Each structure stands twice: as C-alpha cells, then as structure tokens.
Image (cartoon, rainbow, N blue to C red):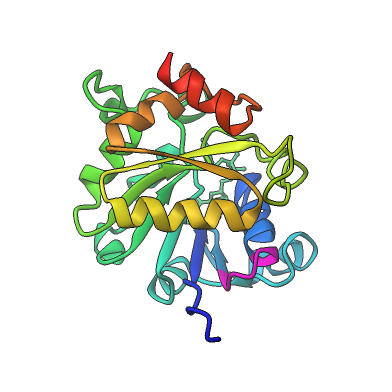
Amino acid sequence: MTTAPQPHIAVLGAGHTGPILAKVLTEAGYAVSIAASGDPDRIALIMSFLAPDAKPRWAADAVAESDIVILALPLHRFGALDPAWFTGKTVIDTMNYWPPVDGVQDLFEDPDRGSSEIVRDRLPGATVVKSFNHIGYHELDDARRPAGAPDRRALGVAGDDPEAVELIATVLDRVGYDPITLMPLTAGRALQPGGPVFGADLTQDRFAEEIAS
Ligand SMILES: NC(=O)c1ccc[n+]([C@@H]2O[C@H](COP(=O)([O-])OP(=O)(O)OC[C@H]3O[C@@H](n4cnc5c(N)ncnc54)[C@H](OP(=O)(O)O)[C@@H]3O)[C@@H](O)[C@H]2O)c1
C-alpha cells in the first residue's frame, strides 16, 4: 500500500508558540521548517533542544518550500510579511489580537470582521484557516492524546475552503487532538479570545455543545 505524501509545513515565529508547534508537528511525522524574523542561525541552538527535527530557515525560504504555513508571530508583526509569499499556500492563523501585547492596531479594531478574516483579506492568494490559537503553548505538548482516548481534547479549525479545513483537521488529528470543523471562516470568531471555547479544555462533544450554545 502506498501512503500519500505529507504536506511540508512552515512555522513563522520561534518564540513561545512556534517551537512547540514545530515539536508536535515533527513528532506527528511532518517535515517542518521554522523561522523567526531574521537569520536562522539565531534560533538554531534553541531549536536543537525544543524541536530538533525542525529546520531553522529564513522566513521567505521556509514559506517557499512549504505547502502549509503557520502564522505564530505576534499580530502586530503580521503587517511586515509580504502577502505575495503566501500565494497558493494553506495558511493556519494562530494569532490572537491582544492589545496589551500588540498595542491597539487600527486594522484589527474592525467590529465587523474577526481577526482571521482580516488576515485572510490581507493574503488574497492564500487559503486561510484559523486553528491552534485557542490552546496555550504550554498545553500543546502535554494535552496530546491518541485517537479514541476518552479525555482527548478537541481543537477547532475554521475556514471558507472545505478542502483546506479537512486538511488541517487531519493535521490536528495526527498531532493528537479531535478536530471540530467550522465553516465558514466567520464561524472561527467562536475560537477568538472571549469566545466560548477560547482556552477551554473540552472533549469533542462538549466543544461542539459550547460552539452551538
Ligand atoms: N502564547 C500562547 O500560548 C499562544 C497560543 C496560541 C496562539 N498564540 C499566538 O501566537 C502568536 C505568537 O505568540 P508567542 O507568545 O509565541 O509570541 P513571542 O514569544 O513573542 O514570539 C514571537 C516570535 O515571532 C517572530 N517573528 C516576528 N516577526 C516575524 C516575521 N516577520 N517572520 C517570522 N517570525 C517573526 C519573532 O522573531 P524575532 O525574535 O526574530 O523577532 C519571535 O520568534 C501570537 O499571535 C499569539 O496570539 C499564542
């Protein structure tokens, strides 16, 4: 039996969240590149401890060699990214708008759009989904469970494109979480800070109930 090739994943951001994402993704069998804002040599040592199988790269190279790009940088740094890099990529937006950290960002003060919708609108060539934003980086590793475990935690994935949502649902499952798919991307507002499942440790049934309530 042949197995389908796995997508290559780039993680942009090597602070608190990015390296843990890189760790759990490489342990799930994905090839992962990780980048901060500058020279990959600056993150090579820390990555050799935190996610030794991930490749430190310049951000542009990490994106170019990947099918899926995870945005794990502070939202106030997002505007510095070149939208052209993301054409044809599936982008997972993990970023939360948090004014105490990001400062007030006029772009993200829009009451009519969730933050991932604003990210989507800034990356017209990409297919954007929202996921991994509503679990703390310190939990991402330890909360993983094999499929079927009674206490397996659910994580949401929201997007407009059914294939992209299913692709990232598969990633969540392989990493160790029960995926809850939400469509369209506007439904991902439930995953934002202040939403019913933000930061919540819920199994699949309870997660779905909270979303529906
Ligand atoms: N903290 C959590 O538990 C958590 C959970 C889920 C989601 N999130 C979201 O994840 C994002 C990152 O949070 P964090 O706590 O990990 O932040 P952090 O510790 O401050 O790390 C920020 C990282 O982003 C990098 N970065 C900045 N500009 C970049 C660019 N243009 N290209 C590539 N990398 C760039 C920084 O690199 P330099 O050092 O080179 O500037 C740094 O490695 C936030 O949007 C947050 O809302 C956080």
How far across and how far down the image is residue 161, in percent?
27, 50
Q: Ligand 1 is found in which quarter of the picture?
A: top right
Instruction: Determine the residue located farthest toward the bottom in the rendered image.
Output: 1
Inspect this view and state whether residue 94 appears.
yes
Question: In screen coordinates, is 183 left or right of 134?
Answer: left
Residue at (52% x, 86% y) in the render? 2
Residue at (26% x, 31% y) in the render? 107
* 27 within the magenta span: yes
State the residue in front, 75 or 96.
96
Image position of 22 with respect to 165: above or below: below
The N terminus sits in image quarter = bottom right
Question: In screen coordinates, is 1 left or right of 212?
Answer: right
Question: In screen coordinates, is 177 left or right of 27?
Answer: left
Image position of 134 with respect to 5: above or below: above
Image position of 50 with respect to 190: above or below: below
How far across and how far down the image is residue 14, in percent?
60, 54
Residue at (30% x, 62% y) in the render? 86
State the residue in front, 24 or 172.
172
- The residues colored magenta run 26-32
The C terminus sits in image quarter = top left
Inspect this view and state whether residue 81 appears.
no
| Picture mark count | 0
Residue at (80% x, 63% y) in the render? 49
